[in-house]
Image (tube, helix red, strand yellow):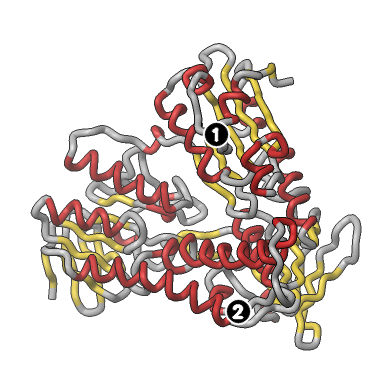
């Protein structure tokens, strides 16, 4: 049996549902297919649950610091992990149910809750039914990589998805991977009360960032009692009674870490290996990401790829922007492109890191004459007043065009303040536009014009 549609969407992550809404509003008959949980990674195993847990961890840490603010609490601070998980499940569940009810109530939209596989460039098989369309949109997301490290198949391990199901506190959580996902879970579980060790193969944490940012983040984590083991060149696993032994082979320190739980946080891979893409002729790269052009067309006319599966971004905001790009080109006669996007993201440790545009290392490599301005959070009144003075701000400017090249704000409110800079970058306005702006006092953002008024050549 086959059914004809004007459009088929595979996956209900951040791009799929709004695209379904736009297509159906245009009068199209749409099929949307979800094999597991509505809402994709963000709602179920990414942003929503983890940031809800981070909020609980922040509350615990703030309670421990209460006396610093003149607040007296009773007994020592405790964390009820069952209650923490229940709160996380409630927040995440409400979002998931919202997406599901939206799609199932959408006029001209048929929801299929099964696995989808391509049969041909315009046919998708769902159970015993073949769906046919000249427009197919792939929005299947990604999942955690399980690294091919010695012994990994001999021990129990957690991923960013399965760790969310814990309702008891790990005695000692060993996290393999010192990048964004790993560091958020590291600080979170340390604040919940676990002993935490981060094992990183590279020479420093979050190697995508500049060295000063990397070192500052490490200092913040170590100040809270998190052990960091870098240069772990030969990582392997073995059972150790009821625990897990992680061999790290670092240049210094004990050669083995014994943990009650192990979290693998070494990267992600796209969910493209079981879609039957070969039947449609859709090209992928060596990592399995679907190859797309600047407007998200795949190698096959009539097929698009949006979100994490196309390798053009690994964030909720880039996935949603993929929807906006496709919709603008289909319906609005606006030639929007992926290359119009400025790199922007945040690391949600406490304090958070907000990032926009180029790093200092990238600016140096560009061959431009670069100006730089910095300021420690100890010289930001809002941070001092809140008692949260860890971190610093850094802004990079092109000396010839006066346009902002990039920025890093590691500090309280950094994930919000970075948008002041990001918006000026999108406007392609000179940095002087922001330098002369009058910001509200006391805020973190008010010091950005001050930084821009004291730029110096990057040495």
Is any atom of residue 232 visible in this view? no
Residue at the spot 80% in from the left edge and 54% down from the top edge: 231
| Front of the two marks 2 and 1 | 1
Label 1 element class: loop
Judge left or right: residue 308 versus residue 53.
left
* Residue 165 - label: none
Q: Where residue 420 appears, x then y in whole percent?
A: 48, 33
Q: Is residue 397 left or right of residue 130?
A: right
Quick check: 129 left or right of 428? left
Residue plotted at (61% across, 49% down): 352
Instruction: State the residue at coordinates (69%, 17%).
Output: 457
Q: Residues within 10 Å of mark 2 (few under 14, many from 20)?
A: some
Query: Residue 239: which quarter of the image?
Result: bottom right
Q: Is residue 303 above or below residue 395?
A: below
Earlier residue among tags 2 and 1: 2
Residue 266 in picture, x, y percent from top left: 63, 60
Residue 342 placed where, x, y %? 46, 35
Residue 370: quarter of image: top right
Residue at mark 2: 81
Can residue 455 be seen in this snapshot? yes
**Which residue has dot 1 on it?**
441
């Amino acid at each position: 049996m086959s059914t004809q549609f004007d459009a088929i969407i595979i996956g209900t992550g951040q791009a799929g549902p709004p695209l379904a809404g736009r297509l159906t509003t245009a009068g199209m008959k749409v099929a949307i297919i979800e094999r597991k949980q509505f809402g994709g990674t963000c709602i179920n195993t990414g942003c929503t649950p983890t940031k809800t847990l981070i909020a609980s961890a922040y509350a615990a840490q703030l309670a421990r610091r209460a006396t610093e603010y003149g607040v007296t609490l009773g007994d020592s601070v405790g964390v009820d992990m069952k209650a923490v998980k229940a709160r996380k499940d409630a927040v995440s569940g409400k979002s998931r149910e919202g997406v599901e009810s939206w799609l199932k109530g959408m006029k001209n939209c048929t929801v299929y809750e099964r696995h989808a596989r391509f049969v041909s460039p315009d046919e998708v098989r769902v159970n015993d039914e073949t769906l046919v369309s000249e427009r197919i949109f792939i929005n299947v997301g990604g999942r955690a990589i399980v690294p091919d490290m010695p012994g990994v198949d001999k021990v129990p391990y957690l991923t960013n998805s399965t760790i969310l199901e814990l309702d008891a506190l790990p005695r000692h959580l060993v996290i393999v991977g010192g990048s964004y996902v790993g560091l958020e879970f590291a600080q979170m579980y340390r604040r919940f009360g676990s002993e935490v060790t981060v094992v990183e193969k590279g020479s420093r944490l979050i190697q995508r960032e500049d060295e000063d940012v990397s070192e500052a983040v490490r200092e913040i984590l170590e100040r809270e009692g998190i052990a960091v083991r870098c240069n772990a060149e030969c990582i392997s696993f073995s059972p150790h009674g009821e625990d897990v032994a992680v061999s790290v082979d670092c240049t210094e320190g004990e050669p083995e870490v014994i943990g009650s739980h192990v979290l693998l946080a070494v990267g992600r891979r796209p969910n493209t290996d079981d879609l039957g893409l070969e039947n449609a002729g859709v090209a992928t790269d060596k990592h399995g990401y679907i190859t797309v052009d600047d407007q998200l067309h795949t190698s096959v006319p009539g097929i698009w790829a949006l979100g994490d599966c196309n390798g053009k971004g690994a964030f909720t905001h880039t996935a949603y922007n993929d929807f906006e790009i496709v919709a603008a080109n289909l319906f609005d006669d606006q030639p929007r492109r992926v290359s119009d996007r400025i790199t922007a993201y945040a690391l949600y440790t406490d304090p958070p890191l907000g990032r926009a545009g180029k790093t200092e290392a990238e600016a140096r490599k560009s061959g431009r004459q670069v100006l730089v301005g910095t300021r420690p959070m100890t010289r930001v009144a809002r941070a001092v007043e809140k008692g949260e003075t860890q971190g610093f701000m850094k802004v990079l400017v092109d000396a010839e065009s006066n346009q902002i090249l990039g920025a890093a704000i590691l500090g309280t409110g950094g994930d919000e303040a970075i948008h002041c800079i990001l918006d000026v970058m999108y406007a392609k306005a000179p940095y002087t536009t922001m330098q002369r702006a009058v910001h509200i006092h006391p805020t973190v953002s008010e010091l950005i014009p001050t930084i821009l008024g004291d730029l110096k050549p990057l040495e």
